[in-house]
Every structure is written in structure tokens, then in C-alpha cells.
Amino acid sequence: MPLVGGKILLKDAIKKQYAIPAFGIVNLEGAKAAIEAAEELNAPIILQTTEGGINYAGHEELAAIAIACAKKAKVPVAIHLDHGRDIKYHKKSLELGYTSLMIDGSVLSLNENIKITNQVKKLIKNDNITLEAELGIIGGKEDDIEEEADNFTKVEDAVKFIDNTDIDMLAIACGTSHGFYHKEPKINFALIKEITTKTKKPLVLHGGTDVPLEQITKAVEAGIRKANFDSELKKAIICGILEYMYQNPDAFDLRKIFRKGIDQAKEVAKSKIKAVGAVNKNWLK
Ligand SMILES: [Zn+2]
């Protein structure tokens, strides 16, 4: 039952001024870690999959895992397509029951980005489904695509983009990048505030991995209403597994081995849920 539309999650986050934590998953272990963390802290969350994750696991397979986990959850969960660049992934995601989409036209010109965003908007027939778009280039490695250093979103572009599209939330480039950092990121909080004020749209923070938690909290105070965390959870799953194997080199029971991975990723997810202010925001209770 708690598989919900992105709209209802976003509405609550806007009203209570927190950000929905969105966790990237490519397998069952990631989904379990995120949902167990959310249940322990009584928080609404988003489970999201990229084109690369879908290509790895299979779209039907990954959707089935995410949706089954969401339906059993004691907290509200939306299923989101992260960085959908090709329209075929949007069409398929809608067929499979995703409740939120992101069209990433950030590498295109502003006008082309507006055009493709409006094409995806037309595919959405259900009012409960949210559409996120991206403006400005968020650096680092997303899926298998490596982007150069950050190219901050321009305020006037954001205003034009919002005036010419009908999206629910906007991902901006504001100093974070995908993956792990070589030096501490510097988030441009003033830019988040200015774009929030001028566009009146909830903003999305990408590249939440490895960002000091107090910076995440400050970004939420400035106007972020969805925050993405991906690489750090995956790394935690691997670290949990490696630690277990180091201590038990003869182990082969995947249930025990993977459980350690889930446990470590769950702790990471909990720290993010706290940082975005989503603890006890489960409105199902
Ligand atoms: Zn991203």
C-alpha cells in the first residue's frame, strides 16, 4: 500500500520544509537498506533507478524489486526514474508503475532541454506522478557518463525554464558532483535561495554522497526538497561484505554475507534521512 505518487511526498516536504531522501538502487540489498532505514526513522523516501542500473538488472526486474519493497513498507515510498535521458525509459517506467520521473536534458541547449522536458510531461497522464528536470551540469560520474567540473545553474535560465515547462521539481548545479569528492564540496547556498525565490519551485540536490551532513542540512534550509544519495550506499554495501569476508574467509552463505552489506548501507541511509530533516515525517501514521 505505501507505494505513493511523488506528488504527495513532495507536497508534504514543501509544507513541512524538509527534503525527501532519494536513494539510488541497483539491487534488492540497496532497496532493503533504504527501506529499513526509513522504517526505523519513520521517514518517507524515494527509491530511484538510473538507466545504467536498469541496464544492469533489467527494467522489469528492478521495478519489481522496488515496487514490491515499497508496497510492503510501513512508510510512504515513491519509485523514481533518475537521470532518464532517453524517452524510451520514461515510457517503460510509466508502464511498470514508477510514480516519479526525471528527464535529464542538462547536456542539451536550454531550448532543447525545454522541448524534451515537455515531451516527457505529455507522457504523464496521472496527476500523482512527479516530473523532475535538470538545468546546469552537475559534475562527476553519473551512471557511465563523466561530466566536467561544475557549471552552476544560471538564475535567468532557471526562470526561463520554469516559465516554459510544467515540472514539479528542478535539479540544479550548485556545487555538488556525483560520486566521491577529491576535496570538500562547497555548496552555493545563496544560489539555492535565489533560484527558490525566483522560480517558486522545489529544488533537487544531486551528488549528496560524501557531502558533510551539516552542508546537506543547510541546503535543505535554503530550499532543497529532494536530496539524492547513491554512491555512498553502494560503497557501504561492498564494505559490509568485504569486512564479513575478511573475518569469515570461508563464508559462502550469501544471506549472511549480504546482510552485513545491508546493515552498513542502512546506517549510511539513516544519517542522510536525519540530515534532510525527514525523521518522523511519515504521514501515514
Ligand atoms: Zn544525479
Image: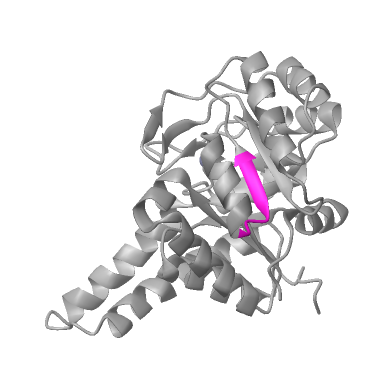
The residue lying furthest to the left in this view is 250
Q: Within the magenta stretch, is there residue 100? A: yes
Position of 198 relative to 70 (above/below): above
Say how the picture is coloured: one colour
Give the position of the C terminus as an image quadrant: bottom right
Image coords of residue 226 (percent x, y): 68, 49
The image quadrant that residue 39 belongs to is bottom right
Quarter of the image where one finds residue 20 = bottom right
Residue at 80 percent across and 33 percent down: it is 166
Q: Residue 127's x, y, as percent? A: 82, 50
Q: Position of residue 163 (x, y in %)?
A: 83, 23
Residue at point 56%, 73% (across, down): 68
Give the mark count: 0
The reply to whether residue 109 is in sight is yes
Residue 214 visible (yes or no): no
Q: Is residue 233 above or below residue 285?
A: above
Residue 38 x %, y %: 62, 71
Examine the rendered structure and indicate whether residue 155 appears above or below residue 98.
Answer: above
The answer to which of 220 and 139 lies nearer the viewer is: 139
The magenta stretch spans residue 164: no
Name the side, left or right, on which 58 lies relative to 247: right
Q: State which quadrant residue 41 falls in.
A: bottom right
Q: Residue at x 45, y 44 (%)?
A: 51
Magenta segment boundaries in residue numbering: 97-102
The residue lying toward the viewer, choosing from 256 and 82, is 82
Q: In the figure, is residue 252 to the left or right of 119? A: left
Judge left or right: residue 153 versus residue 108: right
